[in-house]
């Protein structure tokens, strides 16, 4: 989230797309309503369903699930062709002037550099053009060069006419143009617009590119870095953002540092590989803040291994686990199911054991039958949960899920009773990147324990085994720093202090002056060093627990800016900054684009307003607004993603139509799929209807169906069906319906509504239906139901390996009524 919840009130236009915030984020959505009431902001909703968000919108436009990129590229084309883009911003704050090398091409659905045998792109084919006169790259500030990023983008989106958008998305041309007129009205200094999105964009085989398209649109309009602007990701649970920040996925360490691969055998090699270099030496692109990578990494190693990490042993880098392939959870389950590891060419055995905390893979994973069968091949599994979830009782799955007979399953399952969220303290990091401390309400019941105590007991027991028995590289475990006052049940305030970082020895500035004495808490990541004098568990969160105390506990609601920044309420990473890239809120001279909504401004001596995203006393022109990128500017063209430098419309893996733009390359050629006998994919001749999944306000994901009072708010599973389609199938409201994909069938009550409508796509009628994900076979007997993901395919985005939950093919039929 670039801006934050409260900042949405500063917008003139709000585009809600890829999410349903009124339903799924009702507390945060009040700021969209505030913008409508106070600023007369226009709310535009683009969604397959007429949602609760659409019900309060100024304009609603339907869109076929999975076709969002075509819609967004159409908006870009409209902005460029009508001149409704912020040209001064684009020249100053984006890579529009960069010249791309002649190797870059886009032909018939394929970018240059595609290797068909690998199903991957060679991204070197997308490089910028080197400038022979300097150490940087060629630029053209007039934006007229035919291979400038600006002209290439203009050419790329020119195919997305309103007629093509209608043909792909099913959105009537007149409604698309209404949306385009409102959204592009913000392409100037006087107005600002924001985008709110959620899993409706993320959960596609082209999910990253959907979000890239939104970012490109906002950069064109000059809306990034400005109050009332940005691309705002609405996280589902209260601490999803915090889990990601702290390395919730295998490929990152805390603070989004790269997990070392096996071939990076020493710290020097690792840092050379992962530390980006500045692309242009010109003032307008300037500094690349990732040049501080060594400081972040060495400080993390010191936090991990303490006194054991020394300069002589590479700060313990050798002990840090390395990867030899893809260990995202769908790959783990694929290895588990097949019984061998793809990373070793199938010659090594798959996992024997599995530990899962705070996750219900059988419920949230695609292709539930594969998940259940994979778990049945383990020797043991440990589940940390406060309820008996589907994963913990996978052998009880009903027969239709296709699992083995329970008598044939040898997996030994241990469920460790974890405390619930109200039974523990600590921080939540919300969508707006705010770390907010919460205090527990009650103690956990019976023998239930907090997560930190359970994990501590496991670690200490494993460490004792290594002390007693040795083993392969015991230093990896024995040298882990565990200096908590209560090592069995660490105080999470102590853990937060460790995450913030402290001085190990006296820390000095470049002039030799001591800025922190040994043992003091650091003020922020600007004080981190690469000489072992500092430790820090997560550089991004540094500043949250200083000598002033636990800033996550702050609750001062003073707002001197009047823009809802609330700098003394909790702590917002990074550096308590409320709007990221806020240098882009000002022009070349440091003056606010809109003086009534200044992000930061240059007062002649320093930047004032929000916490500046650059050195506070650096004059305009010294640093670019995007100092985390090698270019120093925002990317309209991104040469680092795995599926292309520009967003392009591709159909879902289970495609409802041939791609009108390039029918020979209908779906993305680099989407990741699996090939086990459980991984079957449907075609539109057998499964002609598009299906999607969604959430409801009353559901706490898969939690509330275990809770006797809460589960009555939504008493059962239902299938939402358009009126005309229901009539065609002989299905009435409240009767039973059956939905079948290539992977199986589920049944539920039919909810026949007007919220879904018939769409004409590429000259054909395409229907879509949907149902909420939430239920399962565990929980209160009267509140169980089918797993929605029994029907979803094992197909993934090639950048994040996120499954394609939001678009898959099914057939619909009337089901036999159950006899009571």
Image (cartoon, grey):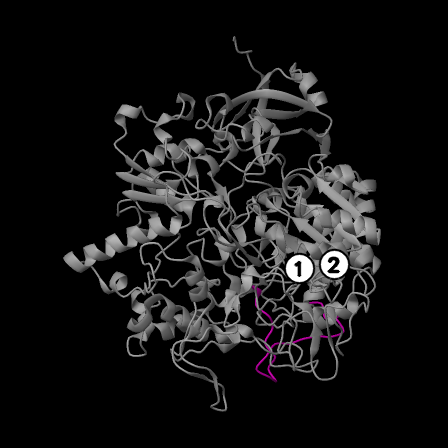
Front residue of 305/473: it is: 305
Determine the secondary structure under disc 2: loop
Q: Report the front residue among 112 and 214.
A: 214
Q: Is 536 positioned to the left or the right of 139 in the image?
A: left
Residues 774 and 547: in front is 547
Q: Are marks 2 and 1 in contact (CB under 8 Å)?
A: yes
* x then y, percent, for residue 101: 60, 69
Residue 301 inside the magenta-drawn segment = no
> Which residue does the image show at 24% across and 54% down from the upper left?
462
Q: Residues within 10 Å of mark 2 (few under 14, many from 20)?
A: many
Within 10 angstroms of label 1, few (less than 14), some, or many (20 or more) residues?
many
505 displayed left or right of 694: left
**Magenta-tinted stretch:** 126-147
Check residue 142 for magenta coloring.
yes
By secondary structure, the bulk of the magenta-drawn segment is best described as: loop
Q: Residue furthest top?
A: 819
Q: Name the residue tied to disc 2.
A: 228
Looking at the image, is 512 positioned above or below residue 35? below
- Say which residue appears at 56% left-offset and 28% top-offset: 810
Q: Is residue 686 above or below residue 349?
A: above
On the image, the x and y values in percent for residue 438 come to 52, 53
**At which x and y percent is residue 38?**
82, 52
Disc 1 marks which residue? 3
| Distance (Cα) linking label 2 and label 1 | 8 Å
Which circle's residue, 2 or 1, is located before the other in the chain?
Answer: 1
């Amino acid at each position: 989230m670039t801006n934050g919840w409260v900042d949405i009130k500063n917008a003139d236009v709000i585009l809600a797309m890829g999410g349903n915030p009124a339903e799924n984020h009702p507390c945060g959505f009040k700021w969209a309503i505030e913008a409508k009431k106070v600023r007369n902001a226009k709310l535009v909703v683009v969604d397959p369903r007429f949602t609760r968000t659409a019900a309060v919108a100024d304009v609603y436009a339907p869109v076929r699930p999975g076709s969002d990129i075509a819609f967004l590229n159409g908006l870009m084309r409209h902005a460029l062709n009508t001149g409704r883009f912020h040209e001064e911003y684009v020249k100053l704050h984006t890579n529009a002037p960069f010249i791309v090398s002649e190797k870059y091409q886009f032909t018939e659905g394929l970018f240059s550099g595609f290797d068909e045998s690998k199903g991957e792109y060679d991204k070197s084919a997308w490089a910028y053009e080197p400038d022979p006169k300097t150490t940087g790259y060629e630029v053209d500030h007039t934006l007229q060069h035919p291979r400038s990023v600006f002209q290439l983008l203009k050419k790329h989106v020119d195919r997305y006419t309103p007629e093509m958008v209608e043909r792909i998305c099913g959105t009537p041309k007149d409604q698309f143009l209404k949306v385009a007129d409102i959204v592009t009205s913000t392409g100037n200094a006087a107005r600002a617009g924001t985008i709110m999105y959620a899993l409706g964009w993320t959960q596609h085989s082209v999910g990253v590119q959907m979000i890239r398209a939104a970012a490109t649109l906002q950069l064109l309009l000059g809306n990034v870095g400005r109050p009332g602007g940005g691309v705002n990701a609405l996280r589902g649970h209260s601490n999803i953002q915090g889990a990601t920040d702290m390395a919730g996925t295998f490929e990152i360490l805390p603070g989004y540092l790269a997990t070392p691969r096996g071939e990076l055998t020493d710290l020097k090699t690792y840092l050379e590989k992962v530390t980006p270099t500045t692309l242009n030496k010109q003032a307008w692109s300037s500094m690349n803040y990732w040049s501080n990578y060594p400081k972040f990494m060495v400080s993390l190693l010191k936090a991990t291994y303490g006194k054991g990490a020394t300069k002589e042993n590479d700060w313990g880098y050798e002990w840090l686990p390395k990867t030899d392939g893809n260990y995202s959870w769908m790959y783990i389950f694929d290895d588990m199911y097949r019984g061998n590891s793809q990373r070793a060419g199938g010659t090594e055995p798959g996992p024997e054991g599995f530990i899962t905390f705070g996750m219900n893979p059988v419920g949230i994973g695609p292709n539930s039958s594969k998940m259940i069968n994979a778990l049945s091949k383990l020797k043991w599994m440990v589940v940390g949960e406060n309820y008996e979830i589907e994963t913990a009782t996978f052998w009880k799955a009903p027969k239709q899920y296709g699992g083995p007979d329970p008598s044939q399953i040898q997996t030994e399952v241990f469920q460790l009773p974890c405390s619930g969220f109200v039974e523990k303290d600590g921080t939540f990091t919300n969508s707006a990147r705010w770390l907010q401390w919460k205090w527990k309400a009650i103690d956990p019941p019976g023998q239930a324990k907090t997560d930190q105590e359970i994990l501590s007991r496991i670690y200490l027991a494993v460490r004792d085994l290594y002390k007693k028995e040795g083993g392969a590289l015991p230093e990896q475990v024995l040298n882990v720093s565990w200096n908590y006052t209560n090592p069995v049940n660490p105080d999470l305030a102590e853990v937060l202090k460790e995450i913030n970082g402290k001085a190990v020895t006296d820390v000095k500035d470049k002039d030799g002056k001591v800025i922190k004495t040994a043992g003091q808490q650091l003020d922020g990541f600007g004080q981190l060093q690469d000489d072992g004098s500092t430790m820090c568990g997560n550089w991004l969160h540094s500043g949250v627990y200083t000598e002033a105390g636990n800033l996550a506990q702050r609750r001062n609601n003073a707002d001197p800016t009047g823009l809802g920044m609330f700098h003394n309420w909790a702590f917002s990473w990074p550096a308590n900054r409320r709007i990221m890239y806020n240098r882009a809120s000002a022009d070349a001279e440091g003056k606010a684009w809109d003086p009534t909504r200044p992000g930061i401004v240059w007062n002649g001596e320093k930047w004032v307003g929000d916490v500046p995203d650059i050195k506070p006393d650096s004059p305009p022109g010294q640093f670019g607004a995007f100092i985390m990128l090698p270019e120093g500017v925002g990317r309209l063209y991104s040469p680092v993603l795995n599926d292309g430098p520009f967003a392009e419309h591709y159909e879902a893996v289970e495609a409802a139509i041939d791609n009108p733009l390039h029918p020979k390359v209908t779906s993305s050629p680099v989407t990741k799929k699996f090939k086990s006998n459980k991984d079957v994919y449907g075609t539109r001749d057998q499964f002609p209807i598009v299906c999607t999944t969604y959430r409801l306000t009353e559901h706490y994901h898969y939690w509330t169906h275990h809770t006797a009072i809460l589960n009555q708010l939504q008493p059962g599973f239902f299938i939402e069906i358009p009126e005309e389609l229901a009539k065609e199938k002989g299905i009435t409201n409240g009767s039973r319906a059956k939905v079948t994909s290539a992977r199986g069938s589920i049944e539920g009550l039919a909810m026949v509504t007007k919220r879904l409508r018939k769409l004409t796509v590429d000259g054909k009628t395409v229907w879509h239906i949907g149902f909420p994900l939430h239920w399962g076979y565990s929980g209160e007997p009267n509140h169980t139901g089918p797993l929605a993901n029994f029907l979803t395919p094992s197909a993934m985005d090639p950048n994040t390996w996120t499954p394609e939950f939001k678009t898959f093919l099914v057939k619909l039929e009337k089901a036999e009524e159950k006899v009571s």
